[in-house]
Image (tube, helix red, strand yellow):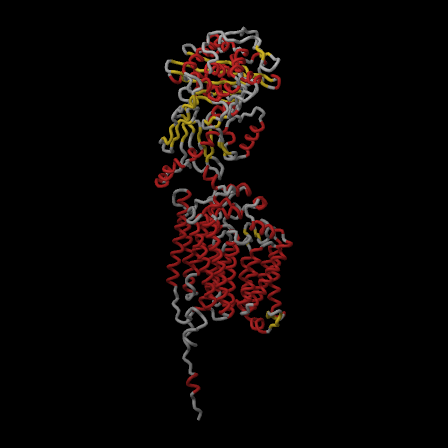
Amino acid sequence: MNKPLRRIAIFCGVLIFALLARTNYLQYVKADELNTRDENRRVRIERYAHERGDIIVDGGKAVTGSKETEDSDFKYKRVWQDGPMWAPVTGYSSQAFGATQLESIEDGILTGNDDQLFFDRTMSMFTGDKKQGGNVVTTLNSAAQKAAFTGLGDKKGAVAALDPQTGAILALASTPSYDPSTFAGNSDKDSKAWQTLQKDKDKPMLNRALRETYPPGSTFKIVTAAAALENELYTDIDAKTNSPVPFRMPQTTQDLPNEGNIQCENVSLREALRISCNTVFGKISDDLGNQKMIDEADKFGFNKEVFTPVRADASVYPKDNPPQNAMAGIGQASNRATPLQMAMVASAVANDGKLMQPYMVAKRQSPSLDDIYTHEPEQLSQPLSGENAQKLQEMMKTVVESGTGSNAKIPGVTVGGKTGTAQHGLGNSENPYAWFVSYAKTDSGSPVAVAVVVEDSKATRDDISGGGLAAPIAKKVMQAVIDSKK
Amino acid sequence: MSVVTNTTTIGAIDAPSRRNTELMMMVFAIAISVFAYANVGLAIDGSLPSGMFGYGAGLILLGGVAHLVVRKFAPYADPLLLPLATLLNGLGLVLIWRLDQSPRLIQRAEYLYGSYSPDAPKQLLYSAIGVALFVAVLIVLKDHRILQRYTYISMVAALILLVIPMFFPAVNGAKIWISLGSFTIQPGEFAKILIAVFFSGYLMVKRDALALASRRFMGMYLPRGRDLGPIITIWALSILILVFETDLGTSLLFFGLFVVMLYVATERTSWIVFGLLMSAAGAVGVASFEPHVQERVNAWLEPFSKATMAQSDQIAQSLMSFGSGGTLGTGLGQGHSDLIMFAANADFILSTVGEELGLAGMMAVLLIYGLIVERGVRTALAARDPFGKLLAIGLSGAFAIQVFVVAGGVMGLIPLSGMTMPFLAYGGSSVLANWALIAILIRISDTARRPAPAPAPTSDAEMTQVVRP
């Protein structure tokens, strides 16, 4: 019986050998493929296995945190302080629904997986320290953010504030907002909170400061005025302009109306901006033509997405026919701008014509708090000469001192601004948007430029004006920045 | 009788007892297990586990008793079988204890049953009962040939064991459990040994008839119906029962057992061909009317397809466990093999080995199984009686097939068919049955290696020289 026994022994050997071959194949040859499969939860488990780094404002205050959960898979979840207020800055990071904005863009630093942290990771492997994420230090100013957020209150709208000298984003508010903490985990409760937010007609998760483009209305007249000065259509802001009332729009039989019964015939640029004459700026836009207007708008940052590093939608000054171009010159027709874009316009004027690249990440820190990246302010463009910028500053100052923007006056501080009440809806049927863009200026240059938009469908139509609704908010934001610099 | 029999590979006479080798290996096996236990505790809590002393003491006690009993009652037994089984049993306990600590599995148990109780203490109890059974077999069974007397009783007992689960409710789709209160038995594991005993007893008697009194049919030698009839009936019956109980793994095991033992008994290669043809027919037949089988085959072919994942992601999870282990593994207690959830510490315990001990650990564990099979086959070769030979090869063949079916299943080499990894997996029946199996192998190897009694001084020689006056 021994011959068949030996053969059975070989057979058993083949069985074991097949298993050995298979385990080699699985664990050596196929390991990478198996480990990178979408179905493999290990990647996500590892991701939430340790505390995430923080997003920091005011140069040292964390607005985020990590909380240990009951969940067996994902040990830590993200929590936010003043979630609704900071959500337009941080975005969200949810175990179930992914991440957006800074939480997503800076994910590598925050989780500690970024290549820049390779050295830290290697070191902690040897020292046996727990793996940790790095921090993202933002440029945000919590006083300004708070002023913006509480100023908007329960109205729908957005605020963007910049430091004109560096491009640092100081405030970025959007209302109605949401609390990212409510759906940071992956429980049924989180899922319900998420569903509710998705279904909300007011779109609380839309970042209106960066991702919503509005017709900029009269605030765009700053750009039109800059175009007029830069192209030397007019050089003296106090000289009479050649602008009739009514101004008939080119190639049409339609007149461009002024709001209310204001005196706009042949007024100076300064006066036209002060009382917001549509006829004067409509004519400027028409006189310069579509291409020159586009060129100037582009220099201010239009027609291009802005990366802060969070992406802001491109504002649009379109290629268009003459009548539309005339309308676009006063911020109507197909002209669209984000609040950030209008803040950039104000900041370029305030910074003597230099437009700085907007940014909100000042530093990235390793888990051991060493700086691994520091942002260097960078000039984006020069939309207007220093001389013309000062002329525009004069004009904007007049708007606040004795014009439509008087609600933004701050005692002891020079403030320049421009109101806007942008029509929207088919045939101007819906409530207009109230705009206000402004800057403050002290002895050491301009510390803040701000753009506010309020889209309040609840207010009665006549109550809506840039000066009435938006200017007080801009004032509070500017005041907060100036106070925090003292 | 000559000094060395040339039919065995092991010297039959004056073989050293090798008991001290066994003792050394036992110390090694237990030390490895205790070290692994400490390793899990350090990885999970950062401190030495509190149960370490109890676990170590328990293992030393079990191993010590088993070793002493072998020393006393089977002094010439193979020295490797006991340490290998102890090592696997000890490692199994560590792995089960490690999975007990998984918050994921605890949460699942609390969600499903409202409470959670760890499995490792129960497994330690089963191991103790298993070793007790091992001791009992060695003490009671002085000679394995006694089992020959129980050929037909074994058969009846096996059939009864296989039929009983039909009257109990199905657990997770398979009717292979008998539940007595909180105690559940999987009789298939014991039936495996009984069937091997029956096949050995029957084939030993009928092997000549089967091998020689056959008719030629299509170039193959087929035995007469009256010789083959009973065995084929019992075999077919057990397969049918198992198919109806949807215990595919065990039916495959019984089939393999049948072919292997028939082949060894008759020494006819044609039986292998015959057996493979039958298995092919059987597989196609079963697959055509059993949706359970079709699901398993589909899950094996496409473990990551949507349909499979919706049914059960166990295979996919198991494969990813192996993948994530890589070459060296994540280390004990540091993997996520508990993502397999259901049966992670039973059918799928090998995935935990794969993930936490890596390719290196998997090769080691598979080689340990390979060594047990190899020692079993050696025992069969060394055995001097055909019954012992058949029983030893039957048991070790069954062991090898079981390892292949389970490991192949969880590694996606063959369709999954639900059995447990001997010694490693959680389960009372499995541990008990496999300790009994090892005891029988040890008994056969003891008999085989035992020195023949010195020829008694007889007066025969003188007698033949008597010259009658």
Q: Residue furthest bottom?
A: B469
Q: Is residue A469 visible?
A: no
Number of numbered discs? 0
Q: Nearer the viewer, residue A88 or A230?
A: A230
Above or below A85: residue B418? below
Instruction: Report the residue at 35% width, 41% height from top.
Output: A126
Q: Position of residue A122 (x, y in %)?
A: 37, 40
Q: Nearer the viewer, residue A352 or A164?
A: A352
Where residue A144 sits, quadrant-wise, is: top left
Q: Residue furthest right?
A: B289
Where residue A431 sits, quadrant-wise, is: top right
Q: Is residue A397 left or right of residue B276?
A: left
Quadrant including the C terminus of chain A? top left
Above or below A264: residue A159? below
Q: Is residue B306 visible?
A: yes
Where residue A335 sits, quadrant-wise, is: top right
Q: Nearer the viewer, residue B54 or B281?
A: B281
Q: Position of residue B63 (x, y in %)?
A: 42, 57
Instruction: Report the residue at 37% width, 13% height from top.
Output: A443
Q: Nearer the viewer, residue A355 or B303?
A: A355
Q: Is residue B312 left or right of residue B360?
A: right
Q: Position of residue A477 (x, y in %)?
A: 45, 17
Above or below A146: residue B154? below
Q: Position of residue A189 (x, y in %)?
A: 54, 32
Above or below A413: residue A163? below
